[in-house]
Image: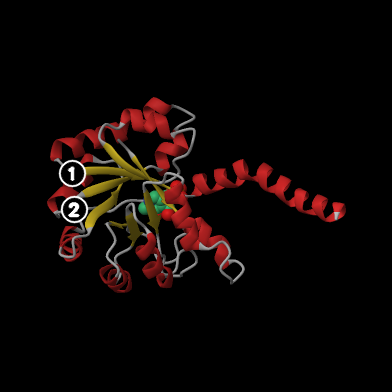
Amino acid sequence: MTRLSVNINKVALLRNSRGGNLPDLVQVARDCEDFGAEGITVHPRPDQRHVRFADIPALRSVVTTEFNIEGNPTPDFLELVLANPPHQCTLVPDATDQLTSDHGWDTRRHAGFLQEVTARLKAKNIRVSLFVDPDPRMVEGAKVVGADRVELYTGPYAHDFFKDPARAVAPYSEAAQAANALGIGLNAGHDLNLDNLRYFQEHCPGLLEVSIGHALISDALYYGLANVIRMYKRQMASKRAE
Ligand code: PXP
C-alpha cells in the first residue's frame, strides 16, 4: 500500500502572503488527515517563505498520522528537527534560495556527511529518507550511509510522462527494484499529479509513500471553487431576502 503524505507548504505560502493566520495551517493539517491523508509533509526552507520554523512545534503536536519534515540538513534545520522529532525526516540537498527541489543527493560523494546526520537523527528514533535521483548507485549509497528510505525525485518523470510514459518511468522502475533488493524503503515525490500518479505507482513496486503538494493544493482550489462561489452568492441572496 502506498501512503499519501500531503505537503502543506503551498498553504503556508498563501497564509504568509497576507501576514495573518488565514488559512490556518494547523487546522489544514488536521483537516487533511480527517479527509484521508496518511501523512503531513512540510519543507521549512531557510528563507521561511513557506512553512516557517515557528510552525513546526504546533504542527508536530497535532499530526496523528505521519509527520515528515523535509529539508537541507543545515545546523538550524537539524536543531529544529531534533527539538521537534517527526516520524520521518527527508534530507534534501537544496540551495538556500532554490525555487523548489530539483535534484537528489550524490550519496557516494557526500557519504561521510550523510552518515553522520543520519546517525544523529536515528538516535532520536526519526526515520531517515534521502532524496535521490533514480539511479541504483545513489540508492545503494543511501543504504550504505544507514538511511531507512530513499525518496525518488520524480520531477523528470512528470516532465516526460506525456511524451513517453514507458520511457519516463523506466529509470524509476530500476531504482525501485534496486531499493527492494537492498531492503531500503521507497518513497517518491515532486510534480506527481492526478494524471501521472497511478502509472508511476504501477511501475514502481514497493512504493511506500508519495508526498504531493503543488498539484494537490491546486486541484483542491479548482475542485473547490464551484462550491465556494455558490456559498458566497448564497450569502448575498439571503441578505437581499431579509
Ligand atoms: N519532495 C520534495 C523533497 C520536495 O522538495 C517537494 C516540494 O516541496 C515535494 C516532494 C513535493 O513536490 P510537489 O509540490 O511538486 O508535489
Q: Quadrant of residue 152?
A: top left
Tell me the amino acid under the disc marked 2. Ala
Report the amino acid beneath label 1.
Answer: Ile
27 left or right of 113? right
111 displayed left or right of 150: left
Q: Tag 1's secondary structure?
A: loop
Q: Nearer the viewer, residue 75 or 97?
A: 75
Q: Which residue is mark 2?
A: 147
Q: Earlier in the sequence, mark 2 or mark 1?
A: 2
Residue 77 vs residue 238: left or right? Answer: left
Quick one: quadrant of the N terminus?
top left
Rendered location of residue 3, percent (x, y): 34, 42
Relative to the observer, which residue lies in front, 224 or 184? 224
When the figure is inspected, residue 230 is found, relative to residue 109, above or below; the finding is above
* Location of mark 1 (residue): 184
66 vs 110, left or right, is right
Percent x, y for residue 234? 76, 49
Q: Quadrant of the C terminus?
A: bottom right
Q: Position of residue 115 (x, y in %)?
A: 16, 60
